[in-house]
Amino acid sequence: MQNKNVLIVGNSYSTAVTFFYLQKYLDRSRVPYDIILISEQRSFFYHDLLPEFLMGQCSLDEITQEFRKIGYMRPGISLMDSRLLEIDFQNKTVETTKGTVNFDYLILAPEFDETTTHFLAERHGILNVQTPLDIVNLKQHIKTVFEKAAYDFTNWS
């Protein structure tokens, strides 16, 4: 009997939690399976800890996690650094930037809607935080705004 392919697609904390607990559950149940995690990014970050990082109470390493360090790697567990292009539900395949992948079960755990996020960013000046570099840029932006406000305040009085 061939292993069932469980395909998880996403870049988020929910992707990581799904990957971790599904792997743990399937191991206990002794169901033969392969898990393939497809993500455009190699890491995710904990949004809840973003304020602590911005205030300097924790480091970037403490709020980011590489997907490879979740659970444990073994034969049958694969990570694919790729972008999802198309889903064919009829044939149970997904097309990625690195080729076609078959699945028996598909779990979609995306973090955001790219179109909506970019629209809001352009329209309302929202900073989109998706990568560790975005976090560092956000911290620098906040620091610059406060320094400018402090300078304007001292020159105003």
Image (cartoon, rainbow, N blue to C red):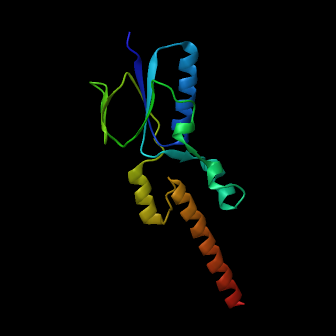
Residue at horizontal 53 percent and vertical 46 percent from the top: 44
> Position of 146 compared to 79: left or right?
right
Q: Nearer the viewer, residue 89 or 80?
A: 80
Picture coordinates of residue 76, whole percent (x, y) = 45, 24
Q: Point out the image quarter for the C terminus.
A: bottom right
Residue at horizontal 48 percent and vertical 66 percent from the top: 125
Q: In this view, does 16 lie above or below 106?
A: below
Picture coordinates of residue 10, whole percent (x, y) = 45, 39
Q: Residue furthest top?
A: 1
> Position of 87 compared to 34: left or right?
left
Picture coordinates of residue 7, whole percent (x, y) = 41, 29
> Position of 29 compared to 77: left or right?
right
Q: Splitting the image into 4 quarters, where does residue 139 fall?
A: bottom right
Q: Nearer the viewer, residue 123 or 13?
A: 13
Q: Point out the image quarter for the N terminus.
A: top left
Picture coordinates of residue 35, whole percent (x, y) = 45, 26
Q: Nearer the viewer, residue 32 or 149?
A: 32
